[in-house]
Image (cartoon, rainbow, N blue to C red):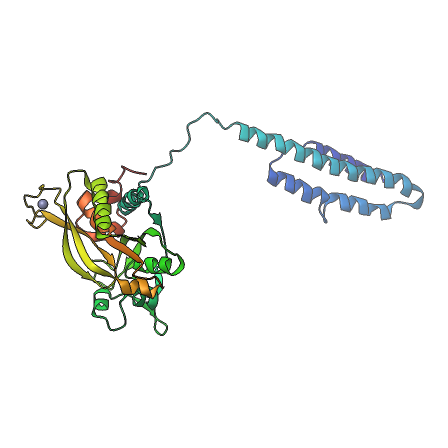
Amino acid sequence: MKDLLQQIEAYRQEMNSYKAPTAEALEAFRIKYLGTKGIVKAVMGQIKNVPNDHKKEFGQILNAFKIFAEERYEALKGMSAPEEQQAVSALDWSLPGDPIPVGTRHPLSIVRNQIVSIFKRLGFAVAEGPEMEDDWHNFTALNLPENHPARDMQDTFYINKNPDYLLRTHTSSVQARVMEKQKPPIRIVCPGRVYRNETISARAHCFFHQVEGLYVDDNVSFADLKQTLYFFVQEMFGKEVKIRFRPSYFPFTEPSAEMDISCSVCGGKGCSLCKHTGWVEILGCGMVHPRMLENFHLDPNKYTGFAFGMGIERICQLKYRINDLRLYSQNDIRFLRQFTEAL
Ligand SMILES: [Zn+2]
């Protein structure tokens, strides 16, 4: 019995000698003393060797030893906490933070935002639609029926045949979707990415970006179209810019025109950018074809409208002299860093 008492006393001293421990040492303490094969359990087991008349007395001693071990464990656990708190408060909050590098907008985003904001000032709302389209919204509704030769100029990526799903070849599909749902007055611009099946080169890419506009209401005239686009180019390229219209063909407009602006590099004298003509082409436009209005159950005798469409890459090229379309999607940070002007 004496041995057991001495041993318990030795364990008590041993436990007392533990200093504020690390998490590992604390766990080691718990396993050594309080674990299922630990010392406390072993000592408690000794009760069976104690003569019956001493059992009560020893039971109290052993119980006290168990409580001591548990309290000691809790005390050590408490001691480790202030140490951690100390480590946290040792941080110097007044030190400057790690710098967060500020990125720049992509040139196409800058130009798209500029175009959209100019038309917004004229009362145009922004409309968007899916990049994956069905045949009706991309072609047929826009007066481009099956076997129409103009479809050849807009070969794209077909996702499904019968019913046909494809990657849209122009944002005109958004115009179709708006005319389907909304009654005039309709005054929208549709910015977005479009796709063509083209071999990638400096002058062509399998995807590019457009902004198209549509205005349908009573008494919309070609004069409205001309003045709207004149306002746009003056805001975009400066007050001194001149415009001219050349007759053209688009299936969804009649009459149709291409619009040129005077070359901003040579001022009209002739240079390599304008191919020595003094003019550069920037967009296509025209009065909405009556058949297209009929496709959307609008009376062409009551309503008229104009539409226009431009490539954002083209406007970007004229504004920033970017001659290679591939640069836009190569993700070269040296190229992208040059466009810090706008956010
Ligand atoms: Zn020029």
Q: Is residue 168 above or below residue 35?
A: below
Q: In which quarter of the image is ligand 1?
A: top left
Q: Which of 324 and 29 lies nearest the eye of the viewer?
A: 324
Q: In which quarter of the image is the C terminus?
A: top left
**Residue 306 pos. (x, y %):** 26, 54
Residue at 78 percent of width and 40 percent of height: 66
In the image, 35 versus 332, the foreground residue is: 332
> In the visual, does 335 lie left or right of 67?
left
Q: Can residue 179 be seen in this view?
A: yes
Residue displayed at 72% across by 35% down: 72
User: Which quarter of the figure has residue 54?
Assistant: top right
Quarter where residue 290 is shown: bottom left
| Side (left or right) of 18 relative to 56 | left
Looking at the image, the residue that sits furthest to the front is 301
Q: Is residue 267 above or below residue 169?
A: above
Q: In which quarter of the image is the N terminus?
A: top right
Query: Number of labelled discs?
Result: 0
Q: Can residue 167 be seen in this view?
A: no
Residue 30 placement: quadrant: top right
Choose between 184 and 161: the one closer to the eye: 184
